[in-house]
Image (tube, helix red, strand yellow):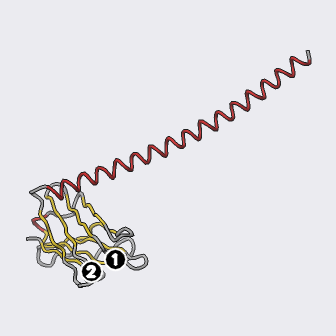
Amino acid sequence: MWGAAAALLLFTLYTSWETVQLNKTIQETSALAQAEIAKRRELQEKFAVARRAAVILTDPHSLKIPMPASSKDMPNLEATWHAKMGIVVVGQNVPMPAGNRTLQLWLIPKASGGKPIPSLMLRPDADGKFMLLVANPPDNMESTKALAITEEPAGGSSTPTTKPIWFGAIS
């Protein structure tokens, strides 16, 4: 009789251990699945941005805006504005802003006395490349005379704190 009780106890202990192991495996698998779902969402978002940017860049209705640099040491940029889809600004060989500084895009209004309208901020990648998509510009093309990019403190500014590094007139 003692043998049957011991066997039952061992069976119960083994089953409990198996349950704990199975729960750990389920938790680990669930965590991996959640991480993969998050990666997939991130890739889908990046794909949507890239697709929208591609349409803006290739649509014949988009306006190309050259953005020459204020310094000969800096590369020229180009912006492309589609009236319904937004603005894409692309750059290559752009030096990284110093320290915690960032580059910020501004829309310069046509209206006399109009103040620059802040837009998105960016930092080029390690190779000096960037692509900035402004899906919903804070102003429209008809009321904007130029785009400008300045170097600003991290987090951006509500008004430009430096002279534009790049400036592109909209014609």
Residue 49 coordinates in the image, percent (x, y): 28, 54
Query: Which residue lies under the disc numbered 2?
Result: 74
Residue 1 coordinates in the image, percent (x, y): 91, 14
Left or right of 49, for residue 113? left
- For the point 64% across and 38% down, which residue is it? 24
Disc marking residue 95: 1
Front residue (pair 101, 57): 57
In the structure shown, which secondary structural element does the residue marked by tag 1 occupy? loop
Which residue sits furthest right?
A: 2
Quarter of the picture containing the C terminus is: bottom left
- The picture quadrant where one finds residue 143 is bottom left
In the structure shown, which secondary structural element does the residue marked by tag 2 occupy? loop
Front residue (pair 105, 63): 63
Q: How many marks?
A: 2
Which residue sits furthest left?
A: 171
**Which amino acid type is marked by label 2?**
Met
**Which amino acid type is marked by label 1?**
Pro
- For the point 84% across and 21% down, which residue is it? 7
- The picture quadrant where one finds residue 9 is top right
